[in-house]
């Protein structure tokens, strides 16, 4: 098995957009997908707002994880927020998702993060089961809110 994980390069932005589209389709959110390769290039390599890694099996891209650092006032340290973790359907159940997540655990440890967090769609029971199997805890007492640019008020 020739599985490996590597950091995304600027040349990977079109591939990353393709994988994000696949994730959006899976999550029934294809209409919400707006990111372009230029958007990702700017965010990842110019603004450095986020980071991403790609997973490969036999030189074939099979998934990705995109994350950024946030901050916990309660913990008093930065945290790692996993925005997206995706493994192509034909490669699921083989430990690749776990390997991606454990890779990010290593990043969080290296960066001395106080915690890792992420969100999961309520209906996505395969992902929920996966995270539960790793010992992650659902934060059921929290509700996620969002404002889109058209809703910003001065």
Image: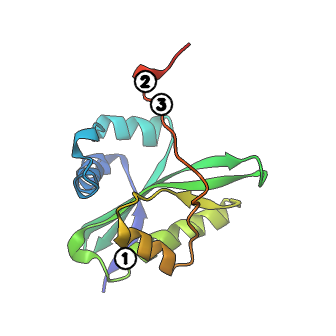
Q: Residue at x 51, y 40 (%)?
A: 145
Q: Nearer the viewer, residue 24 or 96?
A: 24
Q: Position of residue 64 (x, y in %)?
A: 36, 61
Asked whether disc 1 touches disc 3, contact meaning CB atoms under 8 Å apart, the reply is no
Residue occupied by mark 2: 149
The CA distance from mark 2 to mark 1 is 35 Å
The CA distance from mark 3 to mark 2 is 7 Å
Q: Position of residue 44 (x, y in %)?
A: 44, 43
User: Is residue 133 visible in this depiction of the protein?
Assistant: yes
Comparing labels 2 and 1, the label whose residue is closer to the camera:
2
Q: Residues within 10 Å of mark 2 (few under 14, many from 20)?
A: few
The CA distance from mark 1 to mark 3 is 33 Å
Quarter of the image for residue 22 reads: bottom left
Give whichever of discs 2 and 1 has the lower sequence position. Answer: 1
Q: Please tell me the numbered disc located at residue 147.
A: 3
Asked whether disc 3 touches disc 2, contact meaning CB atoms under 8 Å apart, the reply is yes
Q: Position of residue 49 (x, y in %)?
A: 51, 40
Residue occupied by mark 1: 96
Q: Residue at x 29, y 55 (%)?
A: 27
Question: At numbered mark 1, what does the secondary structure look like: helix, strand or loop?
Answer: helix
């Amino acid at each position: 098995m020739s599985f490996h994980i590597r950091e995304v390069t600027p040349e990977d932005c079109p591939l990353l957009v393709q994988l994000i589209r696949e994730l959006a389709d899976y999550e029934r959110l294809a209409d919400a997908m707006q990111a372009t390769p230029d958007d990702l290039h700017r965010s990842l390599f110019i603004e450095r707002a986020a980071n991403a890694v790609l997973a490969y099996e036999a030189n074939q891209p099979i998934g990705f994880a995109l994350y950024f650092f946030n901050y916990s006032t309660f913990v008093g340290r930065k945290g790692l927020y996993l925005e997206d973790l995706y493994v192509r359907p034909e490669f699921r159940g083989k430990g690749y998702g776990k390997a991606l997540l454990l890779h990010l655990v290593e990043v969080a440890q290296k960066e001395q993060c106080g915690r890792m967090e992420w969100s999961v769609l309520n209906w996505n029971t395969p992902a929920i089961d996966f995270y539960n199997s790793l010992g992650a805890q659902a934060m059921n007492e929290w509700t996620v809110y969002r404002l889109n640019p058209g809703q910003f008020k001065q």
